[in-house]
Amino acid sequence: MQVRRFRFFTLLIVAAMMLSTALGQIAVPTFGTRGTIDDVFLQSFMTQFRRQISLELEFEVNNAEVITQGVAGSLQAEMAFLITDVMKQRYAITGELSQEDRLQGKAPYSVRILIVDSQERRSSDIISLPLSEASVPEVVQNLAGQVSLFITPTLSPEEGTAALFVVTEPLYADILIDGVKVAETPLKDALMLKPGPYEVEVRKEGFIPNSRLVTLQDRKEMMERFTLTPLVGGSIQLKSQPDANVLLDGVAVGKTPLTLQALPGNHSLIMERPGFQPSSFNVRVENYRVSRVNQTLEPLSDVVFFWEAFPSELVFINGVLQTRDYQDNLEPGSYQIDLRSGGEKRSFTVTIAVKGAYRLDFSLSRAVRLE
């Protein structure tokens, strides 16, 4: 069987070298499918996805037509690197569209992709998103944006006067700040950053990634300790805007941002938060890989305010005390916001002209719209 497989890939490489004449910078073969996927829908999705990548990156996209869907549908980095070799490209994307019968029509399909860079020999997490025929333009824009971030990584965070010291067990783990690798443990000196909120993540091959949100203060040092758990199977890294409660296979497992260990195979996910439409879809987990989900929840009414406040803090909107961490059924207009704590009061006015969900940022006295 291994001999036949080797011969198959050898023939594939030879055929591609003979047939491939248009060399772009990124190979995006037609994805594989799981379940019943209409071919017209698949081809329409691929056309829009390739076009969006070309617009986002100003890249020539190679359709890699000689790559079979069996290879293109693999979410294994080794297969994606094979495609870069075959098609003479630096980058390649593999992926699959799958039918999701268990989600009762809320998200009839899912799309999953993996991106590789053959020059630096690095690969992305498996990126998963729910998909419907109506959401294709939004989904391809989201995916193309994540491809762009992988190919042109975000700059390292700015240096500042706040100190962060990270300790991990075991040692020699990568430290990422807002998704950008900045150092490795053990640290000799604290990381000096501008004051403010950051997502701090640590990763080590063979272990489940661990992350948390921290807020650094001017001229103060914060120490964060991370204990990494050995990986058995794969893991799912979940983020959402806004933060949401998560059910994995029907069981409540915590609140985003969250990283979970999971056995290989398909798992059902539900993200829910009061005032927003629950997001339900499936995610496929592969052995020893991270499957990443980053979802923006849709508000249930034209305008929704949401916020994070300490139990000792009281929030008033137009003079009315709020007993929840959100306020829905609002309309565009101006609103008086008051935050009271320990006898102190902070007030500001926000004017909403566009419908959507807005996070009340009490530190900056403004409302930030979710995109």
Image (tube, rainbow, N blue to C red):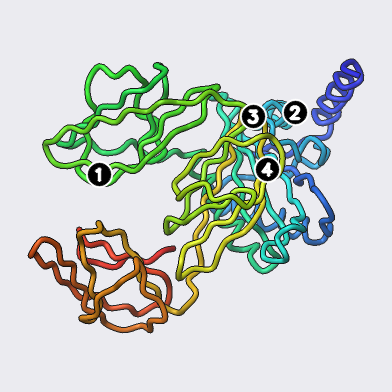
Within-10-Å neighbours for mark 2: few <14, some 14–19, many 20+: many
What amino acid is found at the position of numbered circle 2 in the picture?
Val
Q: What residue does disc 3 label?
A: 233
Marks 3 and 1, how far apart at CA? 32 Å
In which quarter of the view is residue 325 placed? bottom left
Q: Secondary structure at mark 4?
A: strand
Residue corresponding to mark 2: 86
Q: Are marks 2 and 3 in contact (CB under 8 Å)?
A: no
Q: Relative to 361, say whether 23 is above or below.
A: above
Where does label 4 land, which residue?
A: 284
> Which residue sits at x=42%, y=81%?
329
Please, what is the three-letter code of the amino acid marked with disc 4? Arg
Which circle marks residue 215 in the picture?
Answer: 1
Figure disc tally: 4
What kind of residue is marked 1? Answer: Thr
Q: Nearer the viewer, residue 72 or 243?
A: 243
